[in-house]
Each structure stands twice: as C-alpha cells, then as structure tokens.
Amino acid sequence: MIGTVLVANRGEIACRVFRTCRELGIRTVAVHSDADENALHARVADTAVRLPGAAPSDTYLRGDLIVKAALAAGADAVHPGYGFLSENPGFARAVIDAGLTWIGPPPEAIEAMASKTRAKELMGIEPLHEVTEADLPVLVKAAAGGGGRGMRVVRRLDDLPAQLEGARAEAHSAFGDGEVFIEPYVEDGRHVEVQILADTHGTVWALGTRDCSLQRRHQKVIEEAPAPGLKPELTNSLYEMAVRAARAVDYVGAGTVEFLVAADTPHFLEMNTRLQVEHPVTEAVYGIDLVALQLRVAEGHALDTDPPRARGHAVEARLYAEDPARDWAPQTGTLHCLAVPDGIRLDTGYTDGDTIGVHYDPMLAKAVAHAPTRAEAIRTLAGALERAAVHGPPTNRDLLVRSLRHKEFTTARMDTGFYDRHLPELTAPTPDPHAPLAAALADAHGASRFGGFRNVPSQPHTKRYEMAGEEHEVHYRHARAGLEADGVRVVHADARLVVLERDGVQRKFEVTRYGDEIFVNTTALKALPRFPDPTTQHAPGSLLAPMPGTVVRVADGLSVGAAVRAGEPLLWLEAMKMEHRVSAPTTGTLSALDVVPGQQVTVGQLLAVVDSAL
C-alpha cells in the first residue's frame, strides 16, 4: 500500500490531493520553488522540499529534481496533478525507474496521447500541413499540455507566421516543449468532454459528460456536469469514443477525452492523460473521490464492474486574479480574504494574507455547487459568488456571476464563442453608488473616536475614492443627531458596518479596510489623497505595463522614431505563463522605448511613448 505521496505540482491541485491523502492516512510531500516557499501547499504538507529558482523551467518542470526530492523525503509514490509534467512520459518513466509508484497512466499511454498530433493520428485524424485561404479559420495548438497555452486562432494567412512563433514560445515556456500543430477551427461549437477511469484489470468507466464551453483564451472558466441538452444517441457516441480511446492505449487511471460538438456532431480534440481541473463537478454528480480512486487503482485494486449512478447537477466556476475588461490581464498582490458561504465547495491554493505572484497561473480557486437540478445549481453558485468575500487584487468574480445568470447560459444555448459575443456587457462597470459614502462614514466613525462628535453643526467633510477606475467624491458632516449625508439617512455607522436609508429602504454595508484598500460589501475602493501627486502623471500616449512580467519580444525593427499605427503590436509581455500583447494606443511616432527583451517590469512601469500624429 502507498504510504507517502509526493505531489509534483503546486497550488490548488497539490492542496486538493493532500486533502484526500490525509483522509486516507497517507503522508504527504510538497515541492516548492523559491517563489512558493510560503505557499499554502508547502505549508499544509507533512514535508516540503525546495526546488531552487522561481521559473517553471528551473523548478516544476525539472523532473530530475522532483524524483530526487521524492527519494530524499521518503515518498513511495508520486502524483503529478495537472499541468507541468503531468503528461510527460519521460517523467513518468523516471518515477517508475526510481522504484516509486506512479499515480497515473502507463508512460506508453501518455506518449501515445500526450502529443495531440499523435493522438489525432491514433483516432484517424490528420492535422493540416499546408494552410490555404479555404482552410481558414484555423487553430494553432501546442502539441503538449493544455490550459489554453500555446493556442492561437488565425483568420488571415498573413498572421500565421507570427501566431506560430508566439504559440511556440508560449508552449515552450509552459510545458518545456515548443511543438505546435494546425487544425481546422470549429466556430461556435460546444466543448464537451467525457471523464474516464480505468484499472489494471480491464475495466473502463465512462463517468458522464461535462460541458466546458465558457472559455477565455481557450482556457475554461465555467464547467458543469452533465453537459446539458445532449441527445441520448450523441451521449452514447461520446462514451463509445472515449472508452475506445482509452482501450486503444491500455489506459490506466483518470483521464478525459475532449470533443467539440457542432450540429450534434462530435469532433475529437484530444485525450488528457491526467486529472482535469474541472474534476470536482464529476465527483459531485457521482458522489466519488477521483483522487482516492486514482490511489486505489495505482495500488492495483479493481474497480466495480459498473460505475456509480449519477445524481443531480454540478457547476464549477474558476476564480482568477485577472481583469477581464483589460484583455484578461493577470493581477498580483495580497489576497487579504477569500471566503464563500457555507454549502459551496472551494478548492484553493491560497489562504488569507497570501501573495499572488507573477510566476504562475492566476487561478485563485474553484467554487462548486451541486443541486438536484441544473437551475438550482446555477442559482446556488451565482448567489454564493455574489456574496463571497474576495478582498485583494481585481478578479473575474463579477464576470462569473453575470455569466451564470446570462440567458444563453441558463437556457443551455452557450458555445465557445460566448465571451467573444458578450464580454463588453459582462464587464461593463456597475459600481454601487453608495459604496464611497459608506466608506467615508466608516472612516468618519474611526476618526470620531479620537475627537468626538461636535455639539454644533460642522462644515461638510470631503473624501475621495477610486472605484471601478473612476474617481468619486462624497460629502458628509457631523451634526447634533449624528452623521448626515445629502439624500441619505444614516441609520448606523461604525468602523465596520454602515446602514443607510433611502426612500424608506435600509441597506447594510460591511466595510473592511486594508491600508488604503477598502472593500464595501463586494465593491473595491481605494482611498485617494486630498491632493494628487503630480509626479505620478504620465505624458499622453504613454504605454504602461498592465501587469508585472517579463518583456519577451519587441516588434521587429521597432526603434525610437518609428511610425506606428493605432492597435499595432509593439511588444509582448509574459506573465503567469501567458503572453500578452501591448499595442500602440494611437497612430503616431514612437518617441520612447524604455525596455528590452528579457527585462522584468512592474505594473504601471513606463514601457514606451507614442506621440500622436494628430
């Protein structure tokens, strides 16, 4: 039997595997980079081993170091999680050759399916080798790994060379393998997948379908099980193809076979030879623990002949530290608080006070709701996210709530083009107009503890806050009856709770402050100084880093004095394993270029200046 498991991964998935191991009485070992020294997964494991460095290529992609860590810590088994080396057959062989139990499929099965090009050949599908106008649009895709990294949609032949270069660079950074291939791009299809689980005794379970159509940058955002609205014959066909793919490579363990479904026709995408991020929705519907079953299969136990029966519906939303309104730009900083109401499963690799860094994926957590019906599960999850305390950098929380309540989603008419169609409306700012006043009144109460309320009316006080990217100014005053604000009656105000009444309706505002960061219910504000600092102003046309990261490329031939067009890409930043394009804000002349490839930049740092031609 397995006694000690090392998880060759980080963050949420490492914590999730550790949780099951603890429940089974199995000891745990974490590996961590220098950037993750104080990360939650390193803290909750029984033992932690350092991988020197911060970049994935120096740490979590170094299979030799991870095997040494397992042996040094006394582990007898390795669980790969997802991403990084989870679909690397060489790593699986190294684990087995070291005398350790590999909690995953045989290396030969990984090898057959880990490269999407070879997987398609196994399923009788040929990738595109020569692309013509008639083939457009096409999808450039990394042969190794997943998660939307190394993927590009190409609609113009002239764009293909640059997109191939960018996809190769991103794939190499994320997976250590820059191989890419090209396939037809299915417009507006649904992303549907089948969870499989196989043992060493010939049993293969097809554990239902999942729909993962809501995606940004080809990375899933909201997933659910079962996939709604599929005809029974289509579902059976998906099961048959998934089981056939598993048996074709003598698969063992948990895996997922992915399809694009258009006009009730399934198009095979790939087989992921690992546990998926979205596995909790399948666990909820089938009442199982997939990690526990992975461990049993790795120990040689047989599965029951038939899988358990499904019950109800489950929906999962991925909470990211990112700004969807700014091209999904990842965000960094301190996560002050992360809490959801009871009844929701929250899988996370963070806890209150942790730092969200620049080196890894910006996913903070997965929130999962299970209910007897799809409508109930959606309502439960949307309500929980709406009330959740997410205090820290900007996140996609509001986008998730609006997506879950969008008519296309609630009526199961969504497809992979959902965010292409609806992103502007889903990210339109709708700040609470009373949040700045509540913050000001809470601040005023704190100040009053030292000076006390005056017995005569005072002059109005003014406070300034930034909310949803805009400045808001509020006015209030101390009076004999307490605090007053125009048009709103102050029922109660202290440093943590403000109650306001307008037109006979009372509303409560919970106020939490972290320095100059303030959260009023779910609205984030920043206290502004009375007088702005003139040194923080930038010239018109300035390009500022939207996130901390590394400058990986500058446009060919770009130099000071060059003429540029509005929207023309000038340079590319890599942050959290994704590449982000920085484009000219206006047509004009490049008057400054302050960075070079390989340079680390901080958020808000000046990158370049374009003088407008107007």
Image (tube, rainbow, N blue to C red):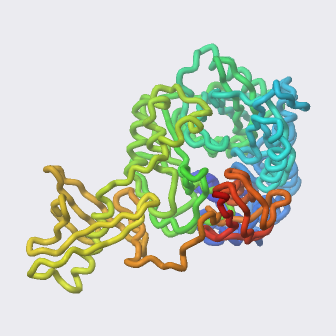
Relative placement, left or right, of 473 versus 82 is left
Residue 412 pos. (x, y %): 50, 26
**In the foreground, 314 or 406:** 406
Tell me if residue 440 comes above or below residue 415 in the rendering. Answer: below
Q: Quadrant of residue 64?
A: bottom right
Q: From this viewpoint, is residue 547 visible? A: no
Q: Residue at x 87, y 27 (%)?
A: 126
- The C terminus appears in which quarter of the rendering? bottom right
Q: Quadrant of residue 446?
A: bottom left
**In the foreground, 239 or 581:** 581
Q: Residue at x 61, y 40 (%)?
A: 215
Residue 485 pos. (x, y %): 19, 65
Residue 222 pos. (x, y %): 55, 40
Q: From this viewpoint, is residue 215 visible? A: yes
Q: Residue at x 74, y 68 (%)?
A: 593
Tell me if residue 186 comes above or below residue 531 in the rendering. Answer: above
Relative placement, left or right, of 128 versus 417 is right
Q: Residue furthest top?
A: 233
Residue 468 pos. (x, y %): 44, 58
Tell me if residue 537 comes above or below residue 564 in the rendering. Answer: below
**In the foreground, 539 or 606:** 539
